[in-house]
Image (spheres, rainbow, N blue to C red):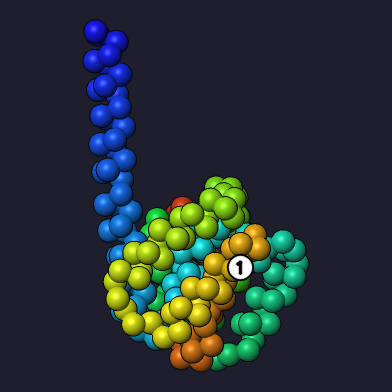
Amino acid sequence: MRTYSVMTLFLLLCLSLSAAEKPDFDTAVRAAVSRQMQTYPKSTLKDLYKNFFQDKFGPGHIIGDTAAAGNYLRRELASYTECSGDIAEPTGWEGNFFRVNLSVIKTGQIPYATFFDAFVRSVNGIQPVTVAEWKKEWLQIEAIIRSMELALPGYEADRKEIEERLDRGEYVGHHSKVFEETYSPHYRIVSKDIFEKELKPLL
């Protein structure tokens, strides 16, 4: 009888924890979506997807070759004179990473070498996850976004494109053309810990 009671209590505890986690996830996703739409009202589903996948995968997809990543960053820095947007903004619903505006290099707030080193080392903080696992999470995120009735342009086409990409085992997404043209984003992804401990004190 005692064993049964303990098992019953354990199962009830597990169920209550699962139920407690769901509202937190839902609330955090909605907050992340609202934050992006307030800052970037012309965002599409593609842009929201990019925000959430960056929170899960960080900058790993663009640092396969450190030298190439450095060359690309230098070319991007040389390609514009003004950089708009917040200095740093958290990614996704967990806030594992920050999008750090390249203006911090342009204005001399953070030396290039310090910034690039932080960017490269941010790969170390990535928790490995399969594309299949990410797809399952994204479908939950997308369902929440859909329930928010944001009237995002091209929603169904974007949703289909993202799901087809995930079915192929590919997770990387890109900003929409309208986002690029409207906001001209220039940033790099840096882990939350590195940003807060090393870069934020310099700002």
Instruction: Locate residue 13 relative to residue 76 in the image: left or right.
Output: left
Which quadrant of the figure has residue 75?
Answer: bottom right
| Depicted 192 relative to depicted 40: above or below | above
For the residue pair 36 and 78, the one nearer the viewer reads as: 36
Residue drawn 56% across the image and 74% down it? 161
Residue drawn 35% across the image and 69% down it? 145
In x, y percent, where is residue 77?
61, 82
Label 1: which residue?
165
Local SS, label 1: helix
Number of numbered tags placed on the structure image? 1
Q: Is residue 102 visible?
A: no
Residue drawn 30% across the image and 65% down it? 31
| Depicted 107 relative to depicted 6: above or below | below
Q: Quadrant of the N terminus?
A: top left
Which quadrant of the figure has residue 20?
Answer: top left
Which quadrant of the figure has residue 122?
Answer: bottom right
Residue drawn 27% across the image and 58% down it? 27
Q: Quadrant of the C terminus?
A: bottom left
